[in-house]
Image (spheres, coloured by chain):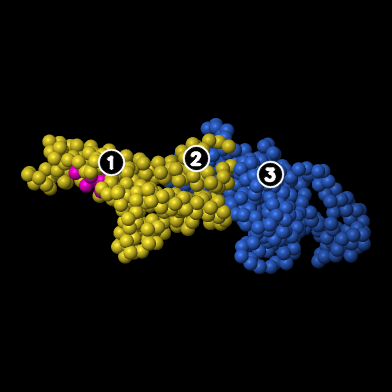
Chain colours: A blue, B yellow
Amino acid sequence: MPNTAEVVKPVASLMGVTKKIGSKTLVSDLTLDIPPGQIFGFLGPNGAGKTTTIRMMVGLISISRGDILICGRSIKDHFEEAIANVGAIVENPEMYKFLTGYQNLRQYARMVPGVTKERINEVVKLVGLGQRINDKVKTYSLGMRQRLGVAQALLHRPKLLILDEPTNGLDPQGIRELRDYLRQLCQTEGTTVFVSSHLLSEMELMCDSVAIIQNGRLIDVKQLKTVGDVLIPVGETFFEVDNPEAALALIGQGVLKEGGVAVGAAREEIAELNARLVAGGIKVYSIKALSRSLEDQFLEITGGEGIG
Amino acid sequence: MGEFAALIHNENIKIFRRLRTWIMLFILALISALFPALIHFTSNGNDVTGIWDSFQTTMAIAFFLNTIFTALVAADSVAGEFTWGTIKLLLIRPWSRSKILLSKYLSMVIFSLISTAVLIGFGYGSALIFSSSAVEPLGGNVMSWSQGEYVFLLILCSYIELFLTAAIAFMISSVFRSSGLAIVLSLSIMFTKDIFIAIFSPERYEWANYLIFAHMNLSNYLLTDTGPGGATLGFAIAVLAVYYVILMAVSWIVFRKRDVAA
């Protein structure tokens, strides 16, 4: 787990970013640092300003107030140098339908120095498009176009990979693969991934940290705990016992719940508590992680509001 | 970063990898090859058409189509990227928007030069085959030019008209992101400019002298020194140049500033 006290230079910094169109404020005073080497989630309901923020990060739309630095370079004033560190998919990856997947990749490869044919093949292999890369894009399914989109974003080995709703249109198998190679990318190449989604469960599985945005405002930034290779959010553990009152008295913490006790405890503590309960003559029927899922937390934070 | 030639190469691929482009070039070749033959077979024995007459008539007809096709390419250049949604991926490369737009503009000009070359090549080739060169001297001279020179100067004038029509289409494409609008507006200017001039004659209205319509066709100046409203060739070229600079400036300013939220 990354040490938050450690001073690391963020890959991207959003500094008081505001986007106004007419009198409507789409994103308001958003300040956020994206630390390197992480998969950083950007979570919010539809219409919260996720895509608007991402568009500002890649220079597709102007920034009304504030600035965005990518690898220390302002996207406003030094666009070409800043964007050279970025690979991105904004919304659906639209490709030239009359070209093959490979020809599409060549288009983007020509626009940056140093992308060899070997690199293109490597990326094609990574996203698993195989022989279909030589077919015209108009014959591709949405999932295949999504893969091609990831491929074009990775060609130039960007330091920051920005993916806007990358799981849209992918089947569960595809989502799983995407998750795996994003993690692989993060670990082997040190790429920082900034991924937006409104699918909470998806973010839980994928991300090291999550920023939550609603109505154009940053609400919270959460770290997700790592246990082994599986990422789970901080949560409570529920002990199902025959005598909840006695169990609560014995443990001395937690809350009484229907048929048991819920305790906020770390991994080692759980085993210890269990030993104490058993030693105290209380029957423990089951122990389960009441991991308040990110979804619950999210709904709690955003108050389950709709699009504002 | 990278080479600018690569950008033009990319844009050329987007034009020439489309079947549509080849159909247009094929039609241009067909028409310009067909007309000298038609002229040849429809004329009766006594009145044989010379090579330059045949070529000139063919070019006059075929250049209309050439202008329409080039306007089509110009109209699609920017608007197409917006329609396809590919603009989002195009603009997040380490290239300024100005350079991307320049590459688009230049590739469109390259297309117009190629299509014009096809037109001239097939038209002239066919005119050579389907005309009797024996009558050539009878064609005589036009003003101080030989007939051959005159025909090529006419083509140059047509190309200038095409060039400006394409610039209008390109500007509308860049500003309104709609290829349909770009085609309709640019071509309607081409087709209605004569009517416009008839209504707002530069002879009657001083301000009409400053309209682009009055000067798009420079071919009059090949025969006479004064054009509509007593304008000189220099004046006409100056007016066209100002319009061209404005069209380009508007295209660039709007494209650079635009929020891409397609």
Task: Specify the amino acid type for callout 1.
Answer: Phe
Nearest the camera: A211 or A145? A211
Residue placed at 24% from the left, 41% from the top? B144
Residue A212, label in figure: none
Quarter holding the N terminus of chain A is: top right
Q: Which residue is mark 1?
A: B152
Q: Which residue is mark 2?
A: B7
Task: Specify the amino acid type for callout 2.
Answer: Leu
Q: Are marks 2 and 1 on the same chain?
A: yes
Q: In the rendered image, is residue A229 in sight?
A: no
Would you say the magenta stretch is mainly helix, strand or loop? helix
Q: Which residue is mark 3?
A: A73
- What is the magenta range? B53-60
Q: CA distance from mark 3 to mark 2?
A: 24 Å
Q: Earlier in the sequence, mark 2 or mark 1?
A: 2
Quarter holding the C terminus of chain A is: bottom right
Residue placed at 58% from the left, 49% from the top? A89
Neighbour tally class for label 2: few under 14, some 14-19, many 20 plus, Cα within 10 Å: many
Nearest the camera: B147 or B72? B147
Could you say whether the residue bearing mark 2 is in a helix, strand or loop?
Answer: helix
Could you say whether the residue bearing mark 1 is in a helix, strand or loop?
Answer: helix
Residue placed at 89% from the left, 55% from the top? A277
- Please state if B72 lies on the left or on the right of A59 as rendered: left
What number of labels is visible? Answer: 3
Task: Specify the amino acid type for callout 3.
Answer: Arg
